[in-house]
Image (cartoon, helix red, strand yellow):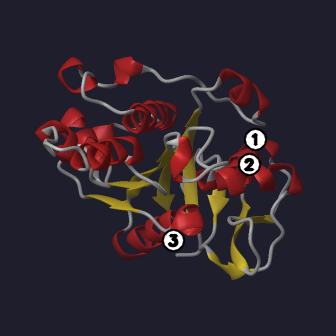
C-alpha cells in the first residue's frame, strides 16, 4: 500500500478562543452524539471523541457501525482516574464502581461500539508525545494488512492542573476516516508515518508541548491548504516522526 486516502475529518475544541485560532473548522462538543443513557456518565474526553467521530463519518458519508475504529489519547480518562486516586487516599477508601468502570484507556472506544452498535474491531492506544504518530502508524498497518476503511480518533481532555503544571490544556479531539489506497473523492493522500527530522511549525510548538495531541494541527491544516506534496512533522521533537501528504482531488 503506497498511501491512505482521507475521506473525511472533523475537529472538536471546547474552548471558544482556542477554537477560533485554529487554521481549520472546529466546533464545540455536541452532546447529542451520545445516547441519553450514556451521556450522563460521559467525560469531556468521551464527549469530544464522539463529537469529532460523528462529524467525520458524516463528512465522509460513511456509517459508523461499519468502520473499525482506533481511539488514541495521551492521558485517556485522566480526570476520572485522578478522582479515583483522590478517593482511595481517604479514610474510607470507597470509590464509585461506575468511576472505576469509566477510568480505562478504552472507555471511549468501548462506548462508541455500544452507541453505534458496531461489531467491527476497536482499539485504544497511548504513546506520550508520539501518540498521533503511533495512531497513524496503527491505521496504516491495519489498512495495509486488511484493506477497506477505518475511523481514527485522537483526543485528550484537560488534565488536572496540579498533576503536570503548565501542561494538559486545551482540550482537543480530531477524527479521520481513512481508506486503503486511492479512493475517489478523497480529500488527501497520507503516506506511511516514518522516523525523520521534519521541523514542526514554530507557531504551534508551544501548544503541542502543553497538549501533545495538538500535534495533529499541521496535518489537518494541510487538508485545506492543498499546497501539493509535502512532508508534515508529527512530533515537535527531532528526530521524531513525519508523514508525506499530497494527492488532493
Residue 224: image tag: 1
Q: Is mark 3 in CB contact (under 8 Å) with mark 1?
A: no
Q: Which residue is at the front of the view, 94 or 223? A: 94
Q: Is residue 116 visible?
A: yes
Residue 92 as seen in the image, left or right of residue 58: left
Mark with earlier residue (3, 2): 3
Separation of marks 1 and 2 at Cα, in angstroms: 21 Å
Q: Are marks 1 and 2 in contact (CB under 8 Å)?
A: no
Residue drawn at x 51%, y 69% as measured from the top left: 134
Q: Residue at x 34, y 59 (%)?
A: 124
Does residue 92 sit above or below 191 in this rendering?
Answer: above
Q: Helix or strand or loop: what does disc 3 sit on?
A: helix
Q: Position of residue 238 (x, y in %)?
A: 77, 77
Q: Residue furthest front?
A: 91
**Residue 133 appearing in the image:** no
| Between 238 and 228, the one nearer to me in the picture | 238
As helix, strand or loop, the secondary structure at mark 2 comes to: helix
Q: How many marks?
A: 3
- Which numbered disc, 3 or 1, marks the residue that appears first in the sequence? 3
Dot 2 corresponds to which residue? 207
Q: Which residue is mark 3?
A: 137
x then y, percent, for residue 131: 53, 64
Q: Are marks 3 and 2 in contact (CB under 8 Å)?
A: no
Residue 173, percent from left and from top: 53, 41
Q: Which mark is residue 8?
A: none
Quadrant of the image occupied by residue 169:
top right
75 relative position to 37: left or right: right
Crowd around label 1: few <14 · some 14–19 · many ≥20 (10 Å): some
Residue depicted at x 17% and y 44%: 91
Horizontal arrangement in the rendering, residue 124 relative to residue 17 (left or right): left
Residue at 62% in and 38% down: 170
Q: CA distance from mark 3 to mark 1?
A: 22 Å
Amino acid at each position: 500500500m503506497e498511501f491512505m486516502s482521507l475521506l473525511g475529518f472533523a475537529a472538536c475544541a471546547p474552548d471558544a478562543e482556542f477554537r477560533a485560532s485554529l487554521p481549520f473548522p472546529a466546533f464545540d462538543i455536541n452532546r447529542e452524539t451520545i445516547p441519553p443513557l450514556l451521556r450522563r456518565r460521559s467525560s469531556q474526553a468521551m464527549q469530544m471523541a464522539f463529537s469529532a467521530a460523528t462529524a467525520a463519518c458524516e463528512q465522509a458519508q460513511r456509517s459508523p457501525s461499519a468502520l473499525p475504529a482506533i481511539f488514541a489519547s495521551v492521558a485517556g480518562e485522566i480526570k476520572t482516574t485522578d478522582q479515583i486516586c483522590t478517593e482511595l487516599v481517604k479514610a474510607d477508601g470507597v470509590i464509585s464502581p461506575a468511576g472505576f468502570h469509566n477510568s480505562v484507556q478504552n472507555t471511549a472506544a468501548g462506548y462508541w461500539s455500544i452507541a453505534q452498535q458496531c461489531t467491527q474491531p476497536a482499539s485504544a492506544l497511548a504513546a506520550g508525545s508520539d501518540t498521533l504518530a503511533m495512531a497513524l502508524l496503527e491505521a496504516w498497518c491495519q489498512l495495509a494488512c486488511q484493506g477497506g476503511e477505518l475511523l481514527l480518533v485522537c483526543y485528550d481532555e484537560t488534565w488536572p492542573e496540579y498533576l503536570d503544571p503548565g501542561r494538559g490544556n486545551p482540550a482537543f479531539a480530531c477524527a479521520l476516516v481513512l481508506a486503503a489506497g486511492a479512493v475517489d473523492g478523497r480529500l488527501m493522500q497520507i503516506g506511511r508515518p516514518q522516523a525523520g527530522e521534519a521541523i514542526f511549525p514554530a507557531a504551534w510548538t508551544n501548544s503541542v508541548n502543553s497538549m501533545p495531541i495538538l500535534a495533529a494541527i499541521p496535518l489537518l491544516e494541510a487538508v485545506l491548504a492543498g499546497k501539493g506534496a509535502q512532508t508534515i512533522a508529527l512530533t515537535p521533537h527531532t528526530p521524531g516522526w513525519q508523514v508525506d501528504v499530497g494527492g488532493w482531488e
